[in-house]
Each structure stands twice: as structure tokens, then as C-alpha cells.
Image (cartoon, rainbow, N blue to C red):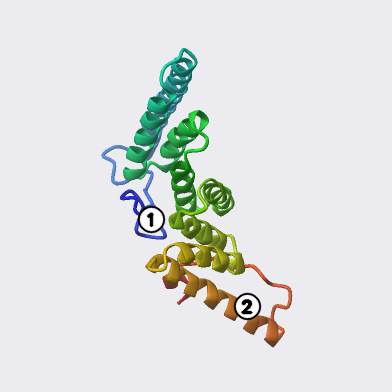
Amino acid sequence: MKLTWKNKNKKRSLATVSLYPNLPFDQSEGHNKKNEEGQKADDDGELKTQVGKNDDVHHKTLASDGVDTTQLAEAFHAEGNKFAEDGKYREALGKWEAALSLMPERVVLHEQKAQLLLEIGEAWNALKAATRATELEPSWAEAWITLGRAQLNFGEPDRAIESFDRALAIKPDAVEARDDRQTALHLVKKRKQLHSSGLSATKNRYVVRDKTESS
């Protein structure tokens, strides 16, 4: 995965913010002011959402009027990349979806979408997007790596191994595929040990976690 926007940390935590962090006025006054500010933020958010929708409609109207759909799709793609680089993943997804509505066979968009969906914890949707990428470009190793990761996160290490094998058949020196394949093999081995011990005879799915969580 060569995308500069990809978050290197597997998990991101949000800092807890106090409602009244040493305000110079009493809590009730601060609360009222916060409510007023919150209402204004909601109004601003609704306005931005409407502007965004109008913008998308405007682009689609231009496409229907004969404007180059490729240029529009590339514009949406670039805007999505910028949002992703800034950590605004939902906004990025919106732009990429708009690009895909114009060019549904743009394979790199499906693969990027899968990566981002994994980033925000939507393994099933990531699996679907990555699968579509491999269908459109079966000879692209990175698409198979992303699919394998989606399968791992969805709890299917056996299928993940198959995907990593496909990637390695295309690109034998893919270090990421080898490393992730080892992770999948470890999960399969662990499952077999659980089965043989009788602790979990029907358990055949796993959720991939950070090493720091499992230690």
C-alpha cells in the first residue's frame, strides 16, 4: 500500500474532553453558552452538508451536460485523497463514492476505499470493496494484499492466506504479503490448537487485534 495518507497506527484514540475545563464563569452559564454554540455548529454543519450535496449535484449535472466525466472523476478522486491525508475519512469516502459513480471501474478507487474502510473498522464493507478491486484487476498484487487484510479483519484467516498467496504469485518480493500471511498462519494454528483442546470446537472466526492489546 503506497498511499501517503494511510494512518500508520492501527488504532487511534480520541482524547476525553471535559465539559467545563476551568471556565471563568459558573457551569450553568457555560452550559448555556455551549448549547448556543452547539446549535450554531449544528446549523453550520447542516449548511455544509447541503452545500456538499449541491456541489455533488452540480458535478453530476455537468457530466450529464457533456462535461468530461473523466476529469470530474479525477477531481473527486483528488479531493478525496486530500481529505484522507487530513484524516477526514468520511469526507474522503464521500468524494471517492462520487468518483466511482462516474467511473465505477476505476480499480484504484475500490482499493483505496477498502483501505480506508479498514482504517475506520468497517471490515465487511472493506472486504466487498477489495473484492471488487481484484475482480477488476486480478493481476494487481496490492489489491490482493488489501483483500487479504480485509479477510483477516473479518475473521477469515484461511481465505486471507489464499489472497496473500495470489499476491505473492504476482509479486514474489512483496514483504507486506509475506508478513501478513504469517499473521494469518498464526491465527489458523491457534484455532487448530483450540479445537484440539476442546475449548472452542465451533469457533472458526477471529478478530485481528493490535499486538499491544493481546499482550
| Local secondary structure at mark 2 | helix
Residue found at the far left of this picture: 24
Quadrant where the N terminus sits is: bottom left
Return the residue at label 1. Answer: 1
Q: CA distance from mark 2 to mark 1?
A: 28 Å
Q: Which residue is drawn at the image coordinates 45% and 23% (left, top)?
A: 56
> Looking at the image, which is closer to me, 47 or 130?
130
Residue found at the far top of this picture: 65
105 shown above or below 179:
above
* Relative horizontal placement of residue 185, taking residue 76 as reference (left or right): right
Q: Which residue is drawn at the image coordinates 42% and 30% (left, top)?
A: 73
- Amino acid of disc 2: Arg
Residue 191: image tag: 2
Quadrant where the C terminus sits is: bottom left
Asked if residue 20 can be seen in this view, the reply is no
**Residue 109 placed where, x, y %?**
45, 42
**Residue 197 placed where, x, y %?**
68, 87
**Residue 61 placed where, x, y %?**
48, 15
Number of marks in picture: 2
| Local secondary structure at mark 1 | loop
Asked if residue 90 can be seen in this view, the reply is yes
Splitting the image into 4 quarters, where does residue 55 fall? top left
Q: Which residue is drawn at the image coordinates 54% and 76% (left, top)?
A: 185
> Looking at the image, which is closer to me, 197 or 188?
188
Dot 2 crowding, Cα within 10 Å, few <14, some 14–19, many 20+? many
**Residue 21 placed where, x, y %?**
31, 46
Dot 1 crowding, Cα within 10 Å, few <14, some 14–19, many 20+? few
- Amino acid of disc 1: Met
* Relative horizontal placement of residue 183, taking residue 31 as reference (left or right): right
Marks 2 and 1: CB-CB under 8 Å? no
